[in-house]
Image (tube, grey):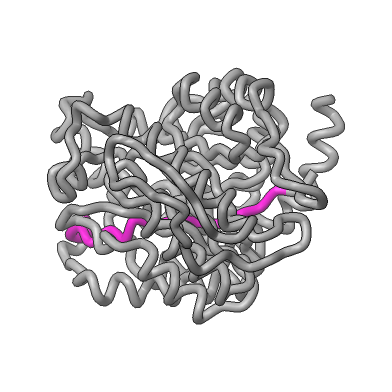
Amino acid sequence: MHMELGVYTFGDVHPDPVTGEQTDPGQRIRDILERVELAEQVGLDYVGVGEHHRPDYAISSPSTVIAAALARTERIHVGSAVTVLSTEDPVRVYQQFATMDAFSGGRVELLAGRGSFIESYPLFGARLDDYDALYDEKIQLLLALDDAGARDGTVSWSGRFRPTLDDALVLPRPADLPGRGRRLNLAVATGGTPESSVRAGVLGLGVNYAIIGGRPAQFAPLAELYRSEFRPRGLGEGVDTGPSVAVSGMGFVADDPKAARDYFYPYWHASMDRIARERGFPLPNRITYDATTTPDGAYAVGSPEEVAEKIVRLAAVLGHDRQILQMDLSGVPQRESLRAIELLGTAVKPLVDAELPRATAEAE
């Protein structure tokens, strides 16, 4: 069993909860590009770039940042985390990602979701009353475009939320790769509803579970539901597809375990407090934080040995293929962010690679 490791970011530009300093959006994006380069250098597999339309995040156009990151790297995969497909035109999204796929040699990934915030809905003229219908229609159109790209690029389609396509030629087409053909690397993002797990499986797509609290092992039934419902898309001879489960969540790596937890806490608290007040959730505190950084908790915060142990433990339960960590909540300074990425690649990844086969065999 192989586990891919990586990081993801939303480009937080909140005031630093420790120093009060605030990084402007342009500098934050430059920071992210530096992090992607380091992630490749230390052997990580993936970096995800999120989308928000708020003043406390730097990235409203993830494809622009992803393209810059791909141009500065040679091996690592870079993708969206997530693309808010409900408020996008799937044709334009397909063209953007097919362009990046072509010039990067197949290293771009598209993670399609509905978004955890709703600012993009009024911004792009979408109605929240159509929340489910928008996503259902647009994911179907995206798949139709992907099917067309694998053939000759022409597609016919009609729906409620965009003009009809009548034998339209949609270009460019993705890179032509062994085992994948001219198809994008597509997956569905979910916070953990059974309906989303079934949808991803029935559509024959990968699934990414965002686990931001509680006990990650509780997602095991959802992962099994997804696998049981998985239906290969019939992508053609020589195209290899199968179920794929990724997990994204918060984490932070430092040389000393206590220092890691103490350092990350104010940054975690600032983000969680902001969201809790906006949504009327219970306010976060050190007790809830510490409870969720335990070996069975959702947060992978600690020394390289602790973080590796947590990932291996979870893999034995979920059987997931990829683990990505959000390690820059509330604008963790660049020096500490880079060190955490370095440790994830040079210390955590070797431990996971060594221990995962043994732990999986024992679980079986």
Vertical relation: 65 (above or below) 326: below
Residue 86 is situated, as x and y percent measured from the top left of the image, at 32, 41
By secondary structure, the bulk of the magenta-drawn segment is best described as loop
**Front residue (pair 252, 54):** 54
Compared across the picture, whether 294 is left or right of 160 comes to right
Identify which residue is drawn at 80% across, 34% down. Answer: 360
55 sits to left or right of 206:
left
| In this view, 309 is above or below 129 | below
Going by the image, does 164 lie left or right of 97? Answer: left
**Residue 310 shows in the view:** no
Residue 346 position in % (x across, y down): 65, 65
Residue at 37% from the left image edge and 59% from the top image edge = 92
Residue depicted at 47% across the width and 42% down the height: 249
In the image, residue 206 lies at what x, y percent? 60, 40
Query: What are the residue bounds of the magenta stretch?
Result: 3-17
Percent coordinates x, y for residue 241 in the rendering: 72, 43
Q: Which residue is drawn at 47% across and 53% down?
A: 167
Residue 13 part of the magenta segment: yes
Residue 113, compared with residue 178, is above or below; it is: above
Q: Can residue 195 be seen in this view?
A: yes
Left or right of 229 in this view: 56 = left
Q: In this view, does 312 lie above or below 260?
A: above
Which residue ends up furthest to the bottom in the rendered image?
72
How many numbered marks are there? 0
Q: Which image quarter is the C terminus in?
A: top right
Q: In which quarter of the image is the N terminus?
A: top right
Is 22 contained in the magenta span? no
Q: Nearer the viewer, residue 339 or 179?
A: 179
